[in-house]
Amino acid sequence: MKFLKTIVFTSLLLAVLNVPALAQPKIATVDMRKLFNNYWKTKQASTALDSLRTEMAKEEKDMTDNYQKGESDYKQLLEQASDQAISAEERDKRKQVAAAKLQELNGSLSEIKEFDRSATARVSDEGQRMKQQLLGDIQKAVADKAKAGGYTLVVSSADTDAIIYSTTDNDLTDAVLKQLNAGAPIDVTQPTPAFSPLLGTTNVPAVSP
């Protein structure tokens, strides 16, 4: 698949280059991964996503703590229901209470499992939404910079499977990053490894103004 990707990309690039001299394209590169990891809004999104994870984990812990307390109460009820010092009638009553408690525990366990599934899905969906929004901001900034510089094609140098050779002569990464981080309210000197997996292996399309 990687080899096929390289062939397709190379063929496309050669086709673009195979035009009359007066219409030769002006091509630039950007490192989309560097832009994504160092964009100040990526850091902001990472913090927000961590807060959501913490909130979900706390809520699930509270539910689990309540379940464990219920388990302890259930065990006590079972012991009381087996107490030979009380009447058979009283033991039967306590057995009924214990049975009701067990049913309640089973319901609580189902709620915990459902909450865990729901929380995992919510964090995943929120992360994907943030990623798409961030990539949209970055691609727009790249397109604006490309138009201003008269470039007809911009490719991502982070996609090592597609780039066979390139120089930094026409690399717009730093210029675009400076534009993205202009007026950022937080420190942007360090990358955000915690959030970078959201970029994953997403294929970032070439940007043509």
Image (cartoon, rainbow, N blue to C red):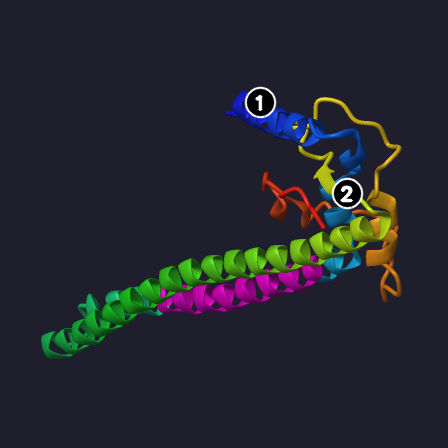
Horizontal side of 155 relative to 73 (left or right) equals: right
Q: Position of residue 146 (x, y in %)?
A: 79, 48
User: In front here: 10 or 54?
Assistant: 10
User: In front here: 116 or 182?
Assistant: 182
Observer-side mark, 1 or 2, equals 1
Disc 1 designates what residue?
Answer: 7
Please report the bounds of the magenta region as a residue range.
45-72
Horizontal side of 73 relative to 146 (left or right) equals: left
Disc 2 designates what residue?
Answer: 34
Q: In the image, what residue type sits under mark 1?
A: Ile
Please name the residue shown 24% across and 66% down the image.
78
Q: Position of residue 134 (x, y in %)?
A: 68, 57
Q: Residues within 10 Å of mark 2 (few under 14, many from 20)?
A: some
Would you say residue 46 sits in the magenta stretch?
A: yes
Q: From where the camera sits, is residue 192 visible? A: no
Q: Residues within 10 Å of mark 1 (few under 14, many from 20)?
A: some
User: In front here: 129 or 137?
Assistant: 137
Horizontal side of 198 relative to 43 (left or right) equals: left
Please name the residue shown 75% across and 43% down the image.
152
